[in-house]
Amino acid sequence: MASHEFTSVRSPRIKGVRRLAKRTFRQRERRFLAEGPQAVREALAAVGGEGRSPYGGTAPGVVEVYATTEAIQRHLDLMDAAQAVDVPVHRVSLDVMTELAQTVTPQGVIAVCEFVDVPLEKVGDVRLAAVLSHVRDPGNAGTVLRTADAAGADVVIFTDASVDPYNGKCVRASAGSLFHLPIVVGVPVARAVDFLRERGARVWAADGGGTRDLHEVADGGDLDGPVAWVFGNEAWGLPEETVRLTDGAVSVPIYGGAESLNLATAAAVCLYTTARQQRRS
């Protein structure tokens, strides 16, 4: 089942894969690592369907899979899925897997994948969108991506001031959602807002200091049509110049004694409130 076996961490092939942990090499090769059975399963599923991605266009490629003997035996479904789309599986020793993995306790399987982002102009109709502006924490970014996917968003835009979505922690936090919907990378926030407005969306800034209450906005019908949310930095929110680009700053009401909500939680509330309103309208 395995194409080759690698047992030395000094192997040039293994060193080449390990370099993808660094953003510079990821951008140069336009490849990244998807670690763990869930991420690998979703990556391989995205290759299926006669070479088409689930969101249109050419499917992202999985270049190869590396797995320990134990992982191969435990995840035979993944090995079958890789074989079905002609993706080679390489058996590696535990030492090599530890070298490749970016987690303390590796799960024994890693895929080398091609970048999946699409140009902004290739995004189709937008009913619900998330824009990450100045979001620096990869775990939060990946969680927002996963939440946007669950809420039925049509696109997630990572602006040029936000974290790299191919960061290992971001990929893991997305739990496979990176492969489910279009993502756009590296555009200025002003361009993203203009594009979404051209698609007919109202654009709201999620901000703890917002003058409008989320429930007030929802009750007033302002979430019924196409909506895009702009989410800011975990610590200091959105700059005023970014808020001015939007239709206004909206806060999530806090009824208890908590000082604030973290980014991922606030994003979940905003996205799911919008999705509910859109389905009722």
Image (tube, rainbow, N blue to C red):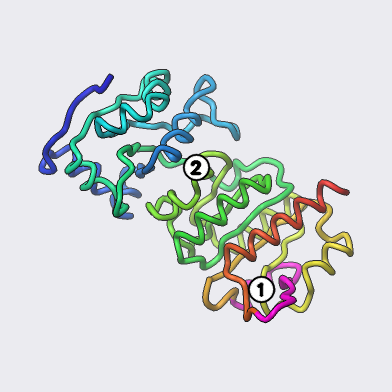
Give me the residue at 25% from left, 29% from top: 90
Q: Is residue 35 above or below residue 45?
A: below
Q: Is residue 50 above or below residue 218?
A: above
Indicate which disc residue 137 carries.
none
As rendered, which of 187 and 98 lies closer to the eye?
98
Q: Which residue is mark 2?
A: 176
Give me the residue at 33% from left, 55% from top: 23
Q: Residue 31's x, y, as percent? A: 35, 42
Q: Amino acid at mark 2?
A: Gly
Give me the residue at 60% from left, 35% from top: 55
Q: Is residue 39 magenta?
A: no
Q: Residue 47's x, y, as percent? A: 47, 28
Q: Which residue is mark 1?
A: 207
The range drawn in magenta is: 239-257
Question: Is the C-beta separation of discs 1 and 2 under 8 Å?
Answer: no
Q: Which comes before the other along the chain, label 1 or label 2? A: 2
**Considering the numbered disc 2 on the image, is that residue within a helix, a strand or a loop?**
loop
Residue 271 image-quadrant placement? bottom right
Our reading of the magenta stretch's main secondary structure is loop
